[in-house]
Image (cartoon, rainbow, N blue to C red):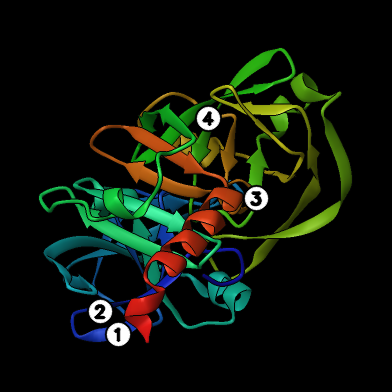
Amino acid sequence: MRSKLIVFQAVVDGQTGYFILDTGIERLLLNMRYFRWAPSRRICAGVDGRCLPVEERLVDLEIGNWRLPNTQADITDLRALEVYTGLPIFGNAGGWLFKDCELVIDYTFRELTIYPHKKSPPHRNRHTEAEAALSFKYKGAMPGLEVQIGARTFRFGLDTGAGANVLDPRRRKDVRPYFIARKEQELATFGNSTATTIGGELHDLKVNGQSCRPMPTLLASLDGTNRQLIGPQLDGLLGYPFLSRYRVAIHFRKREIRLWSPETVREQYLAYQEKHKGNNR
């Protein structure tokens, strides 16, 4: 995990590089700096509203021992993400790659674990019972959750590729008492440049009834995302500021998200260490 994004190593057609886990897109998105193929009519949309043309190709993808042959990939310009992370980013791994998996994201111990559904999920024995279980509806491959801000209800996407929470500017008037603007900030997205937007803090926010502490939030258009992805219109995105406050398990087939607090995760880890202390000698 780096620069508030979930970065891991994977292999595409024999090339090993860094990839960003990105439930905000559907497919595998590769960096044209390292991969080229055939032009297409497809476009990809970033959270700043810009749309970029993409190329397409079939590739073999390997993440650890997990192999996905003949995976459809889009190819576009990802230079801004390389600047943002300080890493050579080979691509972004979209949500549909994990449609037959459960992902467990743990910022406390900087772990990403992928459990294919066809295998027995060993984490059921490792983790305590979740403190919350939230159902979701898909927006493309992105989990969409009901969010309450004050007395109003909105729909936010759970976007692991977002280093910040995002609120569509058209919803700012609806949350005026609860969004406190602070300063302009840069937003990194697809392409070769960053965008400048207003950053602030969002208060009185609940996710499916779960109260959240005030969270940093940027104003950015979701027009491109809403046009490109099938599903209910999104008013915002929950990114790093939300994800980093929990251990998060995303079960794509069950359409369920489970949450554990960092305090619970640490207590469980210490109990596990104590239980197995004699085995480590």
Q: Residues within 10 Å of mark 4 (few under 14, many from 20)?
A: many
Element on which disc 1 rests? strand
Circle 4: element type:
loop
N-term-proximal mark, 4 vs 1: 1
Cα distance between the residues tagged 4 and 3 = 18 Å
Q: Earlier in the sequence, mark 4 or mark 3?
A: 4
Q: Is residue 180 above or below residue 233?
A: below
In the image, what residue type sits under mark 4?
Leu
Q: Which mark is residue 16?
A: 1
Mark-to-mark CA distance, 3 and 2: 29 Å
Image position of 112 (left or right of 194) = left
Q: Dot 4 corresponds to which residue?
A: 234
Q: Nearer the viewer, residue 166 or 261?
A: 261
Across and down, in percent, residue 249 comes to: 39, 46
Apparent side of residue 86 relative to residue 200 in the rendered image (left or right): left
Task: Please say if the residues under marks 2 and 1 sit with CB atoms less than 8 Å apart.
Answer: yes
Which residue in the protein does label 2 denote?
11
Give me the disc on residue 241.
Answer: 3
- Earlier in the chain: of badge 3 and badge 2, it is 2
Q: Position of residue 133 (x, y in %)?
A: 42, 31
Asked if residue 34 shows in the view, the reply is: no
